[in-house]
Amino acid sequence: ETGVTQTPRHLVMGMTNKKSLKCEQHLGHNAMYWYKQSAKKPLELMFVYSLEERVENNSVPSRFSPECPNSSHLFLHLHTLQPEDSALYLCASSQTRWRGGDNEQFFGPGTRLTVL
Amino acid sequence: QQQVKQSPQSLIVQKGGISIINCAYENTAFDYFPWYQQFPGKGPALLIAIRPDVSEKKEGRFTISFNKSAKQFSLHIMDSQPGDSATYFCAASNTGGFKTIFGAGTRLFVKA
């Protein structure tokens, strides 16, 4: 596998379910991100992890819970979601400037989430 | 101050024509301005990027024009092709930090 991979690609869940999204980066980057992409809206940054520590949390509801067990893996745990949470959830990774990179974001293909 | 405003929202261009997408930013701390291209079912992918120390950058048919004093930058796609039909996002970031601010996107359709 190369680049950034995400599983599952599609997910349908009820409002009472608990599910998790998984992201893996094979680029040796030191930062990983979760974004939410809704129709006709800018990409919304949700969480940023650098070297497994959360460095950014953009006022995301607590029904979204991130986990970064190591620098290659990132999870987004979901519980009691609302229909308005239906969106494409994108994972990205980057090599930050202080680690010799440009902070260019490399994106995975996303998970299309539908909340019924 | 953190916004990046992108226009137009959608664009239809004839094959062989020039596609132009514009963006404006407010935060003068931004020092890296990438453009991303996204096809249906895929994540955004970096297309071309520029730093504010140059006014233009060209890679093949894609050119970024950058106006630092106006805080504006634009993407020009020369000789547009049907395969260029995608959504394009401008973005801005301060490479000393983690945040990249994205525009709302422009859906480009190139007619054959």
Image (cartoon, coloured by chain):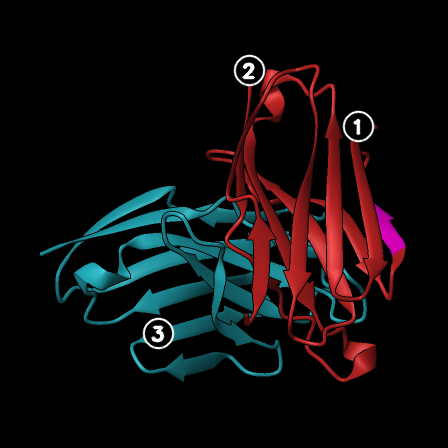
Residue B94, picture quadrant: bottom right
Would residue A57 be counted in the magenta stretch? yes
Q: Which residue is mark 1?
A: A61
Mark 1 or mark 2: which comes first in sequence?
A: 1
Residue carrying label 3:
B62
Q: Amino acid at mark 1?
A: Pro
Secondary structure found at label 2: loop
The label nearer to you, 1 versus 2, is: 2
* Chain identifier, colour red: A
| Crowd class of label 2 (few under 14; some 14 to 19; many from 20; radius 10 Å) | some
* Residue bearing mark 2: A116
| Residue B77 at x, y percent in the picture | 30, 68
In front: B70, or B26? B26
Would residue A6 be seen by someone viewing this image from the given angle? Answer: yes
For the residue labelled by badge 3, is the local secondary structure a helix, a strand or a loop? strand
Q: Vertical placement of B93 versus B7: above or below?
A: below
B9 w.r.t. A74: above or below: above
The label number, if any, that marks residue A114 in the structure image: none
Kindly indicate whether the residues beneath marks 2 and 3 are on one polypeptide chain: no
Magenta residues, start to end: A54-58
Q: CA distance from mark 2 to mark 3?
A: 41 Å
| Amino acid identity at mark 3 | Phe
A84, above or below A2, in the image: above
